[in-house]
Image (spheres, rainbow, N blue to C red):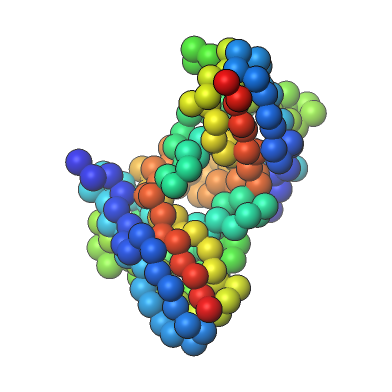
Amino acid sequence: GENVEQHPSTLSVQEGDSAVIKCTYSDSASNYFPWYKQELGKGPQLIIDIRSNVGEKKDQRIAVTLNKTAKHFSLHITETQPEDSAVYFCAASIPGYSTLTFGKGTMLLVSP
Amino acid sequence: NAGVTQTPKFQVLKTGQSMTLQCAQDMNHNSMYWYRQDPGMGLRLIYYSASEGTTDKGEVPNGYNVSRLNKREFSLRLESAAPSQTSVYFCATGQGLGTNEKLFFGSGTQLSVL
């Protein structure tokens, strides 16, 4: 099955800096790569996703890039704010009747 | 519009006790999932239901059973709780497997087994 590795496990940045979280996947058939944000005491919430026919997708301060050859994808957050502090999960899925495989998560702390 | 509702929010059990975690959704979604979240382990799939009447094992099904009672409700049962089942449990829903679907999560149940 699919295996997703996520790095780093924790990331501390100053407000206004950029943050980058990286994930690698094992199955080249995977074609869908979502990112979820989990705030303290809440369930994860989808913030952005990308499909394998697209190399980059952007939504305001967040962007995701995908390198199919290297089998890795990354989340980029620019101009970080304290409210960006949360745990972020990447995931991947294979086409057809398949479930999402999640990475182990990255705790992002943005200091004022 | 509640979305995905999990009950209870907190529970403490003694080893060997049984309990059922409840999940209900009002989003008219076909698929429902149970995940557990442990420190450093991310989200691991316990069981899922692609549609009413079907259930399948996920990555870590041992020690659990599920019931898809109807389209709205998907319950997770621990027949004989063990300390290793101390975790935060999340229910999630999606429009349907195979569609690269967006998942919607409940707010979780924090379970401690002593």
Q: Quadrant of the C terminus of chain A?
A: top right
Q: Residue furthest bottom?
A: B16
Q: Position of residue A85 (x, y in %)?
A: 55, 31
| Residue at (55, 71) in percent of width and height | B85
Q: Quadrant of residue B21?
A: bottom left
Instruction: Relative to A102, say whether A110 is above or below.
Output: above
Is residue B104 visible to us here?
yes
Instruction: Relative to A111, say whether B51 is above or below.
Output: below
| Residue at (44, 78) in percent of width and height | B13
| Residue at (63, 42) in percent of width and height | A105
Instruction: Relative to B22, say whether A18 is above or below.
Output: above
Along the line of sight, the residue nearer the viewer: B20 or B51: B20
Q: Quadrant of residue A53?
A: top right
| Residue at (43, 73) in percent of width and height | B12
Q: How many marks?
A: 0
Is residue A62 visible to us here?
no
- A59 to the left or right of B26: right
